[in-house]
């Protein structure tokens, strides 16, 4: 139960707890419980439905399955191509995540720790892009990618994903690299380390907490990306998971394979759920920290 | 050493800058120019038409529907999300830490899901015959309330807004919880000794002290309200709903560009969306500055 470790600051609310107990008001508990039900019920319903037959889904939406139809999952994974979409997502998001973290941390470090003419300008050129809606770039971006012959290719998606994830990464890591002590880096320089070696061997390991936070943030953002692949990735064989699921919800609706679609939906939720269960404190802290910066 | 320094800086900055210029800056810059042309995608055949596209936007009823719907979302979605988020966050402060942590885990999860997953899930929930919502209403004897949530023009947009609220509340509960936990406990105790009730405590102590977080939330939720593309595109018929009841600017832009091939006109929609976003951000930052002055 270490996952449920209370946040440190909640200790401060303990002094106010005893008076609340002498005057028990059920309303807060009812409200909190209700929202938990509203949040969890549709999700649990989708998971349960993914094990039902089409007949059960259509006629008894609230009941539990009479037997576990594991075949739904197999059908979704193979016949409905969820497996292929999953693999495509892994390739594109994995490639883009590695490239984003490498380029983003290099830029953030260079701008945070080196004085040179144009430093501020480059920083603002990157950061300003965060305030533009992607819709504005969509039309020209399509033609840029097309002219480079990268439409519907893995490298094309990886490069575009990276380009749009780097600004936030730079913004987040820039302040992080500024706070790192300079003594260790100076000692490494005196020992004859090159600039690259100081970055990769000394500064990058020191920045691990920041890299972890922004890495999780980027993973979720890239994994859930929909608009960019919708425009830049027209080949159904290369659909990423979100794109494939959206297409499936239209075509399966016509073929009325409801159970297969519920299974596909559940498969799409699983990796995020697993990541959340494993890292939930870090994820919540990292994502909210990114927002208030 | 100086030589190595410049080589390192070039190696660190140039690859990312090239990507940034090619895939981010140049498309943004081109969009402004394209919005002043009648380009339909054929190379070299864009003629300059001045502000014609913008004049046409003013008479395009579907686009005006989209603007209206985005404004409705802007009025409803941030406010409701922040209200529920603040309410739950201040309730969580008073609950036991173990239970509160459990609730936070549940509340936050939808934030992590792709809007595509959320949209597909809720199109099942809203399904008129077999959906969770209608069959639940019928089961408890409220079958009269059951309806085609996404197909009736007067309910479609609000049903979409409800989905956006559902997927966002958890994030803001956690954000506001962090802000509330930063308030010294003595302030709450002093208020309690002075006889403040729950509501007075919330409006006089909690709300003023988390104001900055609320402003951040307004900016983020406002930007999301001006988007709403994925949810509308996947959930509503058309897409865009009955009689354009759920049309949004992003959807108009996408259709105009990639179904009709009117790339110049679509770019004008993008520029309009950009200025809407910019106005929103500036207004929120302005009001933030004024309040900080008042506090000082």
Image: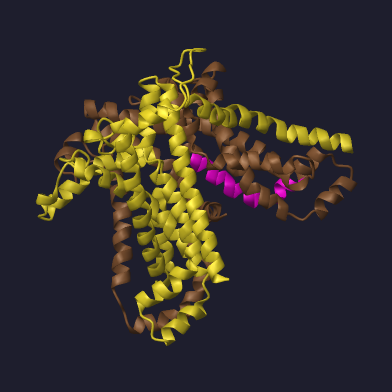
Q: Is residue B253 left or right of residue B131?
A: right
The residue stretch that appears in magenta = A202-221
Magenta span: helix, strand or loop, mainly? helix
Residue B90: quarter of image: bottom left
Q: Is residue B74 above or below residue A151?
A: below
Residue B249 picture location, percent across and down: 37, 36
Residue A198: quarter of image: top right
Q: Residue at x 38, y 45 (%)?
A: B225
Report which colour depicts chain A.
Answer: brown
Q: Residue A70, can we see it?
A: no
Q: Nearer the viewer, residue B102 or A73?
A: B102
Query: Which chain: yellow?
Result: B
- Indicate the quadrant containing the N terminus of chain B: top left, top right, bottom left or bottom right: top right
Q: Residue B4, can we see it?
A: yes
| Colour scheme in use | by chain
Q: Is residue B40 left or right of residue A42?
A: right
- Indicate the quadrant containing the C terminus of chain B: top left, top right, bottom left or bottom right: bottom right
Queried whether the magenta region covers residue B31, the answer comes back as: no
Residue B6: quarter of image: top right
Q: Is residue A136 above or below residue B206?
A: above
Residue B136 picture location, percent across and down: 17, 51
């Amino acid at each position: 139960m270490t996952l449920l470790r209370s946040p440190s600051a909640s200790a401060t609310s303990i002094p106010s707890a005893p008076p609340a107990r002498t005057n028990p008001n059920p309303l807060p508990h009812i409200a909190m419980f209700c929202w938990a039900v509203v949040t969890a019920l549709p999700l649990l319903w989708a998971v349960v439905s993914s094990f039902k037959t089409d007949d059960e889904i259509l006629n008894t939406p609230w009941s539990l399955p009479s037997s576990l139809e594991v075949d739904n999952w197999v059908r979704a994974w193979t016949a409905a191509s969820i497996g292929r979409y999953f693999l495509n997502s892994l390739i594109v998001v994995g490639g883009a995540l590695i490239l984003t973290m490498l380029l983003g941390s290099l830029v953030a470090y260079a701008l945070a720790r080196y004085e040179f003419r144009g430093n501020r300008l480059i920083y603002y050129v990157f950061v300003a892009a965060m305030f533009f809606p992607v819709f504005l770039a969509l039309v020209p971006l399509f033609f840029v990618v097309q002219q480079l012959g990268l439409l519907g290719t893995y490298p094309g998606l990886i490069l575009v994903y990276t380009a749009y994830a780097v600004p936030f990464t730079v913004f987040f890591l820039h302040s992080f690299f500024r706070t790192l002590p300079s003594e260790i880096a100076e000692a490494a320089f005196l020992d004859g380390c090159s600039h690259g070696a100081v970055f990769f061997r000394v500064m990058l390991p020191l920045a691990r907490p920041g890299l972890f936070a922004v890495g999780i943030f980027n993973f979720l953002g890239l994994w859930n990306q929909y608009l960019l692949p919708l425009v830049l990735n027209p080949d159904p064989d290369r659909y990423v998971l979100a794109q494939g699921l959206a297409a499936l919800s239209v075509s399966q609706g016509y073929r009325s394979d409801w159970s297969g679609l519920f299974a596909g939906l559940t498969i799409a939720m699983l990796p995020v759920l697993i990541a959340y269960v494993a890292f939930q404190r870090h994820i919540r802290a990292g994502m909210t920290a990114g927002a208030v910066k | 050493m100086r030589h190595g320094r410049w080589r390192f800086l070039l190696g660190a900055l140039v690859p990312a800058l090239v990507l940034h210029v090619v895939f981010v800056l140049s498309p943004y810059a081109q969009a402004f120019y394209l919005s002043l042309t009648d380009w339909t995608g054929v190379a070299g055949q864009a003629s300059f038409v001045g502000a014609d596209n913008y004049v046409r936007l003013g008479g395009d009823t579907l686009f005006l529907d989209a603007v209206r719907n985005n404004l409705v979302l802007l009025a409803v979605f941030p406010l409701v999300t922040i209200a529920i988020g603040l309410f739950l966050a201040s309730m969580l402060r008073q609950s036991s830490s173990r239970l509160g942590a459990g609730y936070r885990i549940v509340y936050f999860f939808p934030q992590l899901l792709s809007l595509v997953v959320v949209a597909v899930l809720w199109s099942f929930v809203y399904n008129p015959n077999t959906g969770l919502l209608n069959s639940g209403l019928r089961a408890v004897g409220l079958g009269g309330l059951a309806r085609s949530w996404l197909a009736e023009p007067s309910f479609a947009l609000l049903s979409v807004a409800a989905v956006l609220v559902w997927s966002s509340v958890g994030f803001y509960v956690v954000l506001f919880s962090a802000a509330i936990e930063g308030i010294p406990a003595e302030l709450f105790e002093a208020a309690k000794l002075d006889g403040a009730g729950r509501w007075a405590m919330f409006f006089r102590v909690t709300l003023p002290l988390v104001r900055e977080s609320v402003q951040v939330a307004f900016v983020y939720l406002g930007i999301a309200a001006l988007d709403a593309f994925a949810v509308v595109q996947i959930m509503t018929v058309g897409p865009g709903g009955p009689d354009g009841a759920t049309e949004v600017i992003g959807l108009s832009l996408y259709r105009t560009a990639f179904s009709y091939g009117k790339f110049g006109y679509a770019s004008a929609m993008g520029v309009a969306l950009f200025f809407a976003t910019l106005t929103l951000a500036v207004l929120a930052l302005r009001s933030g500055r004024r309040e900080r002055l008042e506090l000082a």
